[in-house]
Each structure stands twice: as structure tokens, then as C-alpha cells.
Amino acid sequence: MFRGGSTVKLDAKGRLALPTRYRPFIAERYEGQLVLTVHDDKCLLLYPQPEWEKIEHQLIHTPNNDRRVRDVQRMLMGYASDVEMDGSGRILVAPRLRDFAKLDKNVHLVGVGKKFEIWNEEAWEQICQGWMAGRTEQSDQPHPLDTLTL
């Protein structure tokens, strides 16, 4: 389970060092094998390979006669890149993925359960400010968080 946030640096080659506390877990449980892809929030998603394979299986088996489904399949699978954590706990973020999420020197890595999100620092600050300002989406449907008690 991944949780918590960290500001990390991308080096000149586009490598990102994962937080030390996760490295042994990723190395032992997943043999350092991860998958990096995009999200429509303009961030990157970093999955352990077995967790990504579950998502990929769902994407492949979702009927794609709907334009939205095809677009999600194209983007998530089209940008998906296998990455391997090196001996120093770093992964290489390909230039096209860095460009997509507008990643610069400082990025924010957020653990959200079975995956990490990788954010441009300014975009992450906007997400935080929106949350604190009480930004909500309007819908006639019950919201999944309505039953969450903190």
C-alpha cells in the first residue's frame, strides 16, 4: 500500500528517485518492475507491474464501440512504459511522459493505494488549493464519498 506525498527531484537525465521507504518493498515484491502511464488530470500514474496488468486486462476487455472508451484505451495503453527501478531506487521517466505532465526539476509523488501519482509541482499545488477551497462536482448521482466517515 502506497500512501503519503514527497517532493522529489528529476535529475538531468529524467530519473526520479522513489522514496527510500518504498524501495525494499518494490524490489522484493515486484522485482523493481513498474509501469508508468498518463492520466487525464495531466499527471502520471506509476503502477507495480502486476497491478498495471489488472488495469490493462480491464481496458483490453472493455468493449470499445464508445469513443470515450477508445480514447482511454489509446491514452493509457499508448503511453504505458515499462520501467525498472535501478539499484539506487530510481526510475527513468521518458521525455514524452515528462512533456505530457509538464514535469520539471521538482515533482510531487503521491502514494494513492496501489499506485503513485506523479505531479508537476504547480499542478499539485492547484489540486491542494482546490480541495481546501471545497471544490465539488455537481451531480444528481450519489457520490462515492458520501458514506465515508473520517
Image (cartoon, rainbow, N blue to C red):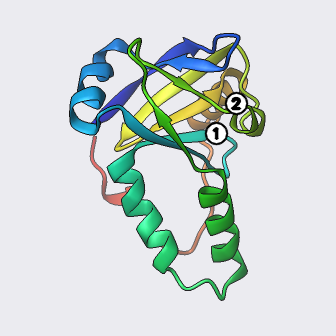
- Which mark identifies residue 20? none
In the rendered image, is residue 142 in sight?
A: no
Quadrant showing the N terminus: top left
Query: Label 2 to label 1, Cα distance in Å?
Result: 8 Å
Q: Residues within 10 Å of mark 1 (few under 14, many from 20)?
A: many
From the viewer's perspective, is residue 122 above or below residue 127?
A: above
Callout 1 amino acid: Cys
Q: Quadrant of residue 135?
A: top right
Residue 58 rendering spot, x and y as whole percentages: 43, 71
Which marked residue is nearer to the observer: mark 2 or mark 1?
A: 1
Residue drawn where x is 67% and y is 52% of the image: 40
Per the image, label 1 sits on a secondary structure element best described as loop
Residue drawn where x is 43% and y is 39% of the image: 34
- Which mark identifies residue 43? 1
From the viewer's perspective, is residue 4 above or below residue 77?
A: above
Residue drawn where x is 32% and y is 21% of the image: 23
Q: Nearer the viewer, residue 86 or 69?
A: 86
Residue bearing the label numbered 2:
123
Residue 14 rendering spot, x and y as whole percentages: 66, 20
Q: Is residue 20 left or right of residue 128?
A: left
Residue 82 rendering spot, x and y as whole percentages: 51, 43
Callout 2 amino acid: Ala
From the viewer's perspective, is residue 9 above or below residue 137?
A: above
In the rendered image, is residue 101 in sight?
A: yes
From the viewer's perspective, is residue 137 above or below residue 35?
A: below
Q: Nearer the viewer, residue 106 or 139?
A: 106
Q: Going from the N terminus, do you reach mark 2 or mark 1 first?
A: 1
Q: Quadrant of residue 16?
A: top right
Q: Is residue 143 left or right of residue 81?
A: left
* Mark count: 2
| CB under 8 Å between discs 2 and 1 | yes
Residue 101 rendering spot, x and y as whole percentages: 71, 36
